[in-house]
Image (cartoon, helix red, strand yellow):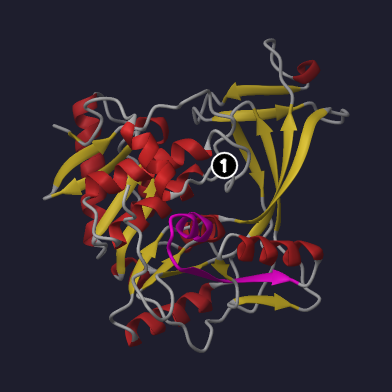
């Protein structure tokens, strides 16, 4: 297989990601067929929201099976590693503390071939540290974002920026990014909003949305951004498709050139000539181990393929494969594929697997 991913720039980076990185501390909770480890860990459905919930026996000593630390994770860290493994010259703009976790995170980025010269080491500060309660094949994440003095480096050389999760203390930093984009009209933006960016609201980030060449979010996030809780209330599949199409059109109305909405095991949705298309997932090669980082792998891989001029269907195929494989491993990085490995999965893809036009 001839390499698709050749460097865009002789000088500078193909893509630079912007966002917080963290250490993920996985805590694997045991379970049995009757509801949990010694019935102290439970999974249930909230009767009001319909969401799955994780229950722990209050005041008890709850055994766990194992723990594991994964460094330099978070949306932008995951995307940087994914792009680097696909052969792109990649760097990240981020912050860490001057602790052992910051040191190990920078070492991990360098080991993955990600440029770390724009990672600011804050003397006396702490590195973001998240706890992940891993139960069955899914996770509940306990997060804490440290307060960093965000700023862009004085000089960066790239044609693509990838913006994702930043803390609640980053409002003014977004204004700095907006100004940079205004002054560098040739730089294209990819936006995957994180938790606090969603909370900021679309009006506060209107210029970011309007400058987005690519945009990624899941179905629930799209409804939150637009204030349209319409898909869950859909009475049948035709109405559901129409409502997903409406969400994508509304995102385009914000100025986004190509929005992509993911829907977990149901696949992903895009508009082509204002018509709705669905890409089914690449079937799991085995039962998923855990799903952390699958969405970042999807978004990063789609972006990498799109930047290389591949068609939307191929972008979605590659993205689906990489997202699937991440679910086969612990953590956001271990299952990220290289170009030749994606090619092997493509060669084994089920006949007929591809874009489906939705009525």
- Left or right? Give the position of 328 relative to 330: left
In which quadrant is the C terminus drawn? top left
Q: Which of the pair 36/47 is nearer the observer?
A: 36
Q: Which of the pair 29/116 is nearer the observer?
A: 116
Q: Is residue 10 magenta?
A: no
Query: Please, which residue is most extreme toward the left here?
Result: 273
Q: Is residue 281 above or below residue 110?
A: above
Badge 1 local density, few (<14 within 10 Å), some, or many (20+)? many
Residue 95 in the image: x percent, y percent? 64, 71
* Residue assigned mark 1: 292
Q: State the residue at coordinates (21%, 27%).
A: 352
Q: Is residue 349 above or below residue 162?
A: above
Residue 354 in the image: x percent, y percent? 24, 34
Q: Is residue 177 above or below residue 282?
A: below
Q: State the residue at coordinates (39%, 77%).
A: 158
What segment is highlighted magenta in the picture? Answer: 80-97
Label 1: which secondary element: loop
Q: Is residue 92 magenta?
A: yes
Q: State the residue at coordinates (29%, 48%).
A: 315
Indicate the quadrant where residue 139 lies: top right
Is residue 246 visible in the rendered image? The answer is: no
């Amino acid at each position: 297989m001839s390499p698709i991913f050749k460097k865009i720039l002789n000088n500078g980076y193909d893509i630079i990601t912007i966002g917080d990185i963290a250490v993920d501390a996985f805590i694997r909770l045991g379970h049995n067929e009757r509801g949990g480890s010694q019935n102290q860990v439970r999974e249930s459905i909230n009767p009001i929201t319909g969401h799955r919930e994780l229950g722990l026996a209050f005041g008890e000593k709850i055994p766990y099976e194992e723990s594991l630390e994964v460094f330099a994770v978070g949306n932008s860290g995951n995307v940087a590693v994914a792009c680097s493994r696909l052969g792109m010259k990649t760097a990240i703009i981020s912050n860490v503390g001057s602790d052992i976790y910051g040191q190990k995170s920078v070492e991990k980025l360098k080991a993955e071939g990600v440029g770390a010269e724009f990672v600011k080491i804050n003397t006396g500060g702490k590195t973001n540290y998240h706890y992940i309660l891993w139960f069955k094949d899914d996770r509940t994440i306990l997060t804490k974002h440290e307060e960093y003095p965000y700023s862009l480096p004085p000089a960066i050389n790239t044609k693509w920026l990838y913006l994702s999760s930043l803390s609640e203390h980053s409002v003014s930093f977004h204004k700095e990014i907006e100004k940079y984009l205004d002054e560098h009209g040739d730089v294209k933006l990819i936006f995957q909003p994180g938790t606090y960016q969603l909370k900021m609201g679309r009006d506060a980030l209107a210029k970011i949305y309007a400058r987005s060449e690519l945009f990624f979010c899941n179905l629930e996030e799209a409804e939150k951004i637009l204030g349209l809780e319409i898909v869950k209330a859909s009475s049948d599949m035709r109405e559901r498709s129409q409502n997903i199409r409406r969400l994508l059109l509304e995102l385009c109305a914000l100025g986004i050139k190509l929005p992509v909405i993911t829907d977990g095991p149901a696949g992903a949705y895009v508009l082509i000539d204002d018509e709705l298309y669905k890409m089914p997932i690449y079937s799991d090669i085995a039962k998923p181990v855990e799903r952390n980082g699958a969405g970042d792998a999807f978004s990063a891989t789609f972006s990498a393929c799109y930047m290389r001029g591949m068609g939307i269907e191929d972008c979605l195929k590659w993205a689906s494969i990489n997202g699937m494989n991440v679910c086969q491993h612990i953590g956001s990085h271990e299952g990220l594929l290289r170009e030749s490995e994606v090619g092997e999965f493509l060669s084994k893809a089920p006949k007929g697997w591809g874009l489906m036009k939705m009525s």
